[in-house]
Structures are given as structure tokens and as C-alpha cells.
Image (cartoon, coloured by chain):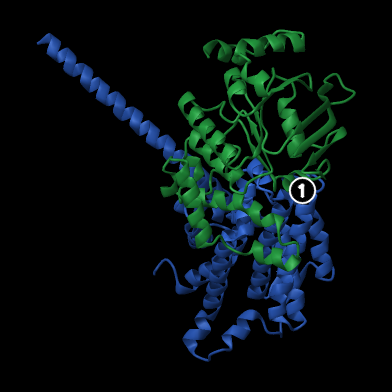
Chain colours: A blue, B green
């Protein structure tokens, strides 16, 4: 543990678990519904802002549900633009994202940041359960682990219900869905609302975690979440649902660990966005690169074998 | 009973590419009728299917199914009682979902039609497919004789085209539809598999006396499958034979009829080839 201190590992784990909720949100919209929802950045900030305002008002638990509801609203607007008004999905996300900037400012009372001080947060409430030292140092981690686990279980259950199956089918084969009396507009709307509720939840959790809400908090979040998602899917494949969902969570935590390593290697903070972008690019390119290498190896060995064969034949002829 | 009254559809109206795909087309199908449809490319066969299935709303005319006017009913609602198979076996199934999950989605049609109250629908949306239903799926799969009942958990993307099309057929008829639309559903399969799927089709349709329309390019099939043969040209039904007249008809008669009615020779190699072959 010379390289890592417990503190660094713990922070990476905690923030990774919060990010995993955003990654799961993208898992629903990007992997399952096959829709690029770019409103994630704004929605994350929205969750944080709404959560912070309600927390400051003295309702830290209510804040979680308020932030999720705000996420649902945001997702509903994105879905409405796509399904009823046929706005291309990428554009719908960008439009909502842009609009959310002003809404987020308004939620925070037109100031670019808010501090949560003097009131309880989810973490302080949970921390108050026991007075033991070990509990004090690990309560946040345990709480976040429980929330992530709960989300994983609920998401897996949901995707197995009739509604969940319809949502999965919508992203997989549109003609089949229409032939099965499912309204794709409805399933897309439900899917995006669920996805953005998770993003809002993550925003609220990070706000209470940092005890602050900032208008630029969400910038680049979609890249981070996508990186986590792809790390997860690259490592765990696309087979069983349980593995896929847990893989996404592990991917998010791994992503934070990679960033923690970068931090320990004294990569300057200004270069962090570049590091994020590199991680995403490498994660996406990895499977293709692996195939390319395998192909080259196979080609080389085949050529070598053929040459050996030829020399053997020629040797036989000469003799 | 399916009743199509005078439907018309013009694509790209008022442009250079204006195309009258359906031109005051009318058709009445009695319950249990199984009609094959032939016609050259662009005759309007697929457009007729799209109109019936609700992929678009027709410009004129009305469509009635069992006395109910469905002209303006959206596609996903019509699919509660209209089953459809496409030429492309990839279109009817979700490749990344397992056989069981695909069947479960198809089975939604059963529950979609009943339970109009909000709470009932809510409970249904969050219910799972029961053990008993899964057992039913297995039973029905075993009727296909393709060993699919032992592969319930494998993704449909791993199946062959023929297996996928057979599965799609099963899904479309899992809940007996009021009408089944088959749009050249065996054309993309190899001959042996095509025969097998066709045999299954005939079996299922006859067993439950489903009203069925089938587009085909095989003239022999057009005369042997079902009880009625329709011919389309320029967005209209130009020939409609059944009964004795049909049973006495040869492939050559059908080709002659076509040349006569359409006022032109067949432009479709596949039809001609199938006529020569059989």
C-alpha cells in the first residue's frame, strides 16, 4: 500500500460507486435502448442542484427523491422531443442539455454554486447510527455500496418484467416491437425517464458528498459514464444480464481507480480531461485492437508454417 | 373477416417521383380464407400489407377487421390482432435477447388486449413471465422440431435464418391473430428450410383456421397453398380465383392470365424461373 493510501482507495471507491449510477443510466439509454442521450451532463447537475436546495431546506432524504423526480422530468422532455416531434435523439439530448443550464442556474437561485453547510446530509444521518471509529471512517462507503447494490437489484428485476423486456426489445429490433403490440414511443419514454432518474440520483449523492453544488459539475460526465460503461462491457462481455449490470458498476469503480493512479503519478490536474478521453478511446478500441493483433499473429504463423513446408519439400526434391 | 374498401396510397405526391402504389384497391377475406398474392415488382403487394398492418395511413378508403374500422388505428395497436412476417428473418426477432425473452415479448399481445383498468395494466407491466407460461413456450417450440426447446436461454442472434423465421412464425401466432400477413417469408431461406417453414405455416394456419394473406414469387406455391389466389398489378387486384377454377389452373395458365390482365409480360425473373423450375 505504499503507492495507494487507504484514503485514496476509499475515495475512488465511493466516487466510483456514485459514478456507477450515471454509467447505469447510460447502460439503459445507450446499451439497451440504443439511444445516445447527451442530456446526461445537464441532468447530473440538475440532480445535484435540486438535491442541494432541498437538503439546505433541511430534508436530506427527500432531496434524493426530489432529484430523481427532476431527472425523470428531464428524461421525459428528451423522450417527448424524440418520439412525438421526431427530433433526432442526439439533437434532443443536446437541446435539453442546453436548456437545463439555465434551469439549473434558476434552481440554485441564479448563483453558480451553493454550499451545503449546517444541515444534515444523507451521509451524516447514516453516520449517526453508530459511534464507533471504524463506522465513522467507512459509513459513507457502506451507504453508497448499499445504494448501488439496491439500484443493481431493482434494475435487474425491472429488466425481467414485461415492461422491462419491451424496453429491451425496443432497442434491439424496432420492427419486432411494432409487431408485438408494443408502442415504441411509450417504452422509449419509460426507459429515458428511468435512466435520467438514476443520473439525478447520482447528482444528488455527489452534491451531498462534496457538500456543494456547482453549475459546471456535470461537464464531461457523459464521457466519464461512457468510459465506465465500455470498460465494464469490454471486461465482462455482453452475455448475462447480471454480469452486464455488475460489470458496468465495476467499470465505473475501475475508471476512478485509473484516475487515482494518474493522480498519484503526478499528472497535472489540467491534463485530467485528456486522461479521461484517452481512457475512453483505449477502452473502446481495445476489443478491435485485440482482434487486429490476433489476426496479425495468425497471419505470421501461417506464413512461417508455409515457408517451412516449402523448404522441406524443396529439401526433399534436392535430395 | 377482413374488408378493404377502395384504399389508395400515393407516395411523394406532386413530385417527379410520384408513385401510385395502391389504386382504389378492394378485397374481402372471409374468416379462415388463406389467399396467396402474386404480382411483379412494384405491383403494390407490400404496400397493401403495410396499409393493412398500419405502417402508414391510407389516403382514401377504409379497412375493416371483424366489422371494426381500423383505418386510423396505430400500427402497434393493430398488431394485437394482426401477425406479420417479413422476408428478412432478422426483422421479426430481437437478436440480443434469448428465445424465451423473445417469446415473452410476443406473448405480451395476449395481455395487451384485456385489462382496460389502469391498475390491472400497471400490475401486468411489472409482472414476470410465469413458470407455466415458460412451459407452454417449450411445448410450442418442440412442435417446430428444430430442437429450439432446449436452447431457450441462447440469444436469437445465434440461430440460423430458417430457425429465426420459424420462431417468428411461432411468435406471430403464439396468440392466435385475427389476420396473418406473410410477406415472402420464405424467400430468403435455402430451399429445404423454406419448405420446412412453409409446411409449418400451412399446418399452423389450417389448425387454427387463421385468415391469412401470403405474398409469394413462386407460382406453384401460389396455386397450391391456401384456398385462393390473388394477382396484383399497378396497385389493384386484377385476378381473384378460388374453388374449382383455381384447382384446374396450371402455372402456365396463371402466367397467361397475368400477361392478359396486366397488359404486359412478366418483368420478374424470379417468377419466370420458378415457373420453369416447377
Displayed quadrant of residue B129: bottom right
At 62% across and 10% down in the image, what residue appears? B252
The quarter of the rendered structure image containing the N terminus of chain A is bottom left
Q: Position of residue A5 (x, y in %)?
A: 45, 71
Q: Position of residue B265 (x, y in %)?
A: 70, 8
Is B99 above or below relative to A158?
A: above
Residue B139 visible? The answer is yes
Is B184 above or below relative to B174?
A: above
Label 1 CA crowd tier, 10 Å (few <14, some 14–19, many 20+)? many
Tell how many labels: 1
Is A80 above or below relative to A141?
A: above
Question: Which element carries disc 1, helix, strand or loop?
Answer: helix
Looking at the image, the residue that sits furthest to the front is B244
Looking at the image, the residue that sits furthest to the right is B14
Q: Give the residue at mark 1.
A: A82
Looking at the image, the residue that sits furthest to the left is A319
At 54% across and 74% down in the image, what residue appears? A146
Amino acid at each position: 500500500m505504499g503507492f495507494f493510501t487507504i484514503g485514496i482507495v476509499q475515495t475512488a471507491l465511493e466516487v466510483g460507486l456514485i459514478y456507477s449510477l450515471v454509467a447505469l443510466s447510460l447502460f439503459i439509454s445507450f446499451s439497451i435502448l440504443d439511444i445516445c442521450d447527451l442530456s446526461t451532463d445537464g441532468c447530473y447537475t440538475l440532480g445535484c442542484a435540486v438535491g442541494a436546495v432541498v437538503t439546505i431546506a433541511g430534508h436530506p432524504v427527500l432531496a434524493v427523491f426530489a432529484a430523481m423526480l427532476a431527472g425523470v422530468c428531464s428524461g421525459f422532455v428528451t423522450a417527448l422531443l424524440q418520439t412525438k416531434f421526431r427530433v433526432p435523439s442526439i439533437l434532443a439530448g443536446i437541446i435539453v442539455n442546453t436548456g437545463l443550464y439555465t434551469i439549473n442556474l434558476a434552481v440554485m437561485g441564479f448563483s453558480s454554486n451553493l454550499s451545503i453547510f449546517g444541515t444534515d446530509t444523507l451521509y451524516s444521518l447514516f453516520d449517526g447510527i453508530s459511534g464507533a471509529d471504524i463506522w465513522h471512517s467507512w459509513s459513507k462507503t457502506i451507504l453508497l455500496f448499499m445504494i448501488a447494490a439496491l439500484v443493481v437489484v431493482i434494475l435487474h428485476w425491472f429488466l425481467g418484467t414485461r415492461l422491462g423486456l419491451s424496453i429491451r426489445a425496443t432497442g434491439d429490433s424496432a420492427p419486432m416491437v411494432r409487431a408485438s403490440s408494443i408502442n415504441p414511443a411509450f417504452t422509449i419514454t419509460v426507459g429515458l425517464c428511468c435512466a435520467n432518474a438514476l443520473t439525478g440520483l447520482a447528482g444528488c449523492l455527489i452534491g451531498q458528498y462534496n457538500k456543494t453544488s456547482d453549475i459546471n459539475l456535470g461537464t464531461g460526465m457523459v464521457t466519464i459514464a461512457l468510459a465506465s460503461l465500455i470498460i465494464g462491457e469490454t471486461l465482462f462481455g455482453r452475455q448475462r444480464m447480471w454480469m452486464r449490470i455488475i460489470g458496468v458498476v465495476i467499470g465505473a469503480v475501475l475508471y476512478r481507480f485509473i484516475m487515482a493512479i494518474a493522480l498519484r503519478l503526478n499528472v497535472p490536474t489540467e491534463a485530467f480531461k485528456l486522461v479521461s478521453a484517452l481512457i475512453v478511446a483505449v477502452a473502446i478500441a481495445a476489443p478491435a485492437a485485440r482482434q487486429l493483433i490476433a489476426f496479425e499473429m495468425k497471419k505470421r504463423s501461417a506464413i512461417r508454417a508455409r515457408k517451412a513446408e516449402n523448404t522441406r519439400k524443396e529439401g526433399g526434391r534436392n535430395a | 373477416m377482413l374488408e378493404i374498401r377502395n384504399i389508395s396510397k400515393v407516395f411523394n405526391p406532386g413530385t417527379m417521383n410520384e408513385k401510385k402504389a395502391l389504386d382504389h384497391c378492394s378485397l374481402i377475406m372471409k374468416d379462415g380464407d388463406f389467399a396467396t398474392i402474386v404480382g411483379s415488382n412494384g405491383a403494390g403487394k407490400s404496400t397493401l400489407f403495410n396499409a393493412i398492418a398500419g405502417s402508414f395511413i391510407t389516403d382514401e378508403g377504409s379497412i375493416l377487421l371483424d366489422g371494426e374500422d381500423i383505418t386510423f388505428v396505430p400500427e402497434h395497436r393493430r398488431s394485437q390482432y394482426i401477425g406479420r412476417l417479413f422476408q428478412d428473418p432478422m426483422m421479426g426477432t430481437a437478436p440480443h435477447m434469448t428465445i424465451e425473452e423473445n417469446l415473452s415479448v410476443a406473448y405480451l399481445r395476449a395481455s395487451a388486449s384485456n385489462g382496460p383498468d389502469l391498475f390491472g395494466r400497471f400490475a401486468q407491466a411489472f409482472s414476470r413471465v410465469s413458470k407455466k407460461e415458460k412451459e407452454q413456450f417449450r411445448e410450442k417450440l418442440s412442435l417446430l422440431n428444430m430442437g429450439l426447446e432446449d436452447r431457450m436461454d441462447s440469444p436469437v442472434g445465434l440461430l440460423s435464418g430458417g430457425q429465426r423465421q420459424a420462431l417468428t412464425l411461432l411468435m406471430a401466432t403464439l396468440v392466435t391473430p385475427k389476420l396473418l400477413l406473410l410477406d415472402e417469408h420464405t424467400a430468403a431461406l435455402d430451399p429445404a428450410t423454406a419448405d420446412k417453414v412453409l409446411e409449418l405455416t400451412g399446418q399452423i394456419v389450417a389448425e387454427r383456421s387463421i385468415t391469412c394473406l401470403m405474398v409469394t414469387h413462386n407460382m406453384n406455391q401460389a396455386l397450391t397453398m391456401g384456398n385462393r389466389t390473388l394477382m396484383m398489378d399497378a396497385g389493384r387486384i386484377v385476378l381473384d380465383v378460388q374453388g374449382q377454377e383455381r384447382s384446374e389452373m396450371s402455372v402456365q395458365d396463371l402466367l397467361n392470365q397475368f400477361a392478359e390482365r396486366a397488359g404486359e409480360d412478366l418483368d420478374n425473373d424470379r417468377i419466370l424461373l420458378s415457373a420453369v423450375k416447377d
